[in-house]
């Protein structure tokens, strides 16, 4: 308006500067999106591994531990570990963005079970009272449960309830679970580097602010070849064009930001609650116990 009505031509910025800034912004936003996407896919791979190894754990515990009660304890202790791990991964961190407006608006379409019930209510369903109390008093509940599982395996092997070959197989699986837990906790406790995230956000904001001023002179030159109503009014097209391009850049920035933290409880999270429900269903079926299908429901549980 100032450029058109009051001839403030000094507001115009050379288009070359805007193009260079837009190119740099595209590179840094693209880099951020690739890195955050890799974080999300690797976090999903971790839980796919947990899913497969959990089924293997259930098969060995069912088929090669003669005492069915001991077999059931191994399986249920594993379910307790899964429960503790998903609760640990859902604990909020200060850098996470699940509460931001663009994430909060989708919250009505799904639920996060870890925010609805306390872990104190669930662990006694899988562990004896003494073990549940010990685990809940530990600084790291999932790590303590894995320690209990290791002690239990050693006792089963010592008493002859578990053969050496299958003891080694289960112990190897236990080591895999420790490794997978550590990798998942790494994604939870170490966010996408803040310096890259901050620079990306600043570049996008600065580009969106400067972009309309870079178009002023270019659109003003279009008036020379215009006739009729649009003659002298081409400058007004700067508004919709700059809004459209700015929306593209801010959307790309928001996409990257929404996938930075794969366990924060946002709409783009790894669905660890659903995966744990599927594992629980499969392992209980191996024991001959019937459970409800966790995939049935109107509201998606992450």
Image: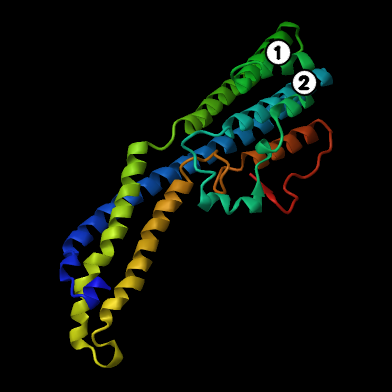
Q: Position of residue 68 (x, y in %)?
A: 83, 21
Of mark 2 and mark 1, the one earlier in the sequence is 2
Quarter of the rendering containing residue 105? bottom right
Tell me if 1 is positioned left or right of 170 in this view. left
- Residue on which the image places disc 1: 152
Residue lying farthest to the bottom in this orientation = 228
Q: Residue at x 36, y 67 (%)?
A: 243
Depth check: give the residue in front, 12 or 138.
Answer: 12
Q: Is residue 32 above or below residue 147?
A: below
Q: Is residue 229 above or below residue 204?
A: below
Quarter of the picture containing the C terminus is top right
Quarter of the picture containing the N terminus is bottom left
Q: Position of residue 219 (x, y in %)?
A: 23, 76
Which secondary structure lies at badge 2?
helix
Tell me if 33 is positioned left or right of 216 in this view. right
Q: Residue at x 27, y 66 (%)?
A: 212
Quarter of the rendering containing residue 225? bottom left
Q: Residue at x 28, y 87 (%)?
A: 230
Q: Are marks 2 and 1 in contact (CB under 8 Å)?
A: yes
Quarter of the rendering containing residue 82? top right
Q: Which mark is residue 73?
A: 2
The residues bearing labels 2 and 1 have C-alpha atoms spaced at a distance of 9 Å
Depth check: give the residue in front, 149 or 213.
Answer: 213
Residue lying farthest to the top in this orientation = 158
């Amino acid at each position: 308006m100032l450029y058109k009505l009051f001839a403030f031509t000094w507001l115009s910025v050379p288009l070359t500067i805007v193009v260079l800034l837009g190119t740099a912004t595209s590179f840094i936003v693209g880099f951020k999106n690739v890195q955050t996407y890799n974080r999300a896919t690797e976090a999903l791979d971790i839980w796919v591994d947990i899913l497969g190894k959990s089924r293997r754990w259930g098969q060995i515990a069912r088929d090669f531990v003669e005492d069915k009660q001991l077999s059931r304890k191994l399986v249920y202790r594993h379910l307790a570990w899964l429960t503790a791990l998903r609760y640990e991964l859902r604990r909020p961190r200060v850098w996470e963005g699940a509460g931001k407006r663009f994430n909060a608006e989708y919250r009505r379409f799904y639920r996060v079970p870890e925010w609805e019930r306390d872990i104190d209510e669930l662990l006694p369903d899988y562990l004896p009272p003494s073990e549940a109390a010990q685990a809940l008093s530990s600084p790291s509940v999932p790590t303590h449960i894995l320690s209990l599982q290791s002690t239990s395996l050693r006792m089963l092997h010592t008493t002859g309830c578990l053969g050496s070959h299958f003891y080694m197989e289960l112990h190897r699986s236990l080591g895999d679970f420790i490794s997978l837990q550590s990798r998942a906790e790494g994604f939870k406790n170490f966010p996408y580097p803040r310096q890259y995230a901050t620079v990306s956000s600043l570049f996008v904001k600065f580009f969106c602010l400067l972009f309309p001023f870079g178009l002023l002179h270019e659109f003003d030159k279009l008036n020379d070849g215009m006739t009729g109503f649009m003659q002298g009014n081409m400058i007004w097209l700067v508004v919709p064009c700059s809004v459209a391009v700015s929306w593209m850049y801010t959307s790309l920035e928001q996409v990257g930001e929404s996938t930075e933290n794969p366990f924060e409880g946002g709409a783009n999270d790894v669905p660890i609650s659903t995966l744990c429900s599927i594992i629980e269903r499969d392992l209980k079926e191996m024991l001959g116990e019937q459970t409800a299908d966790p995939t049935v429901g109107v509201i998606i549980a992450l």
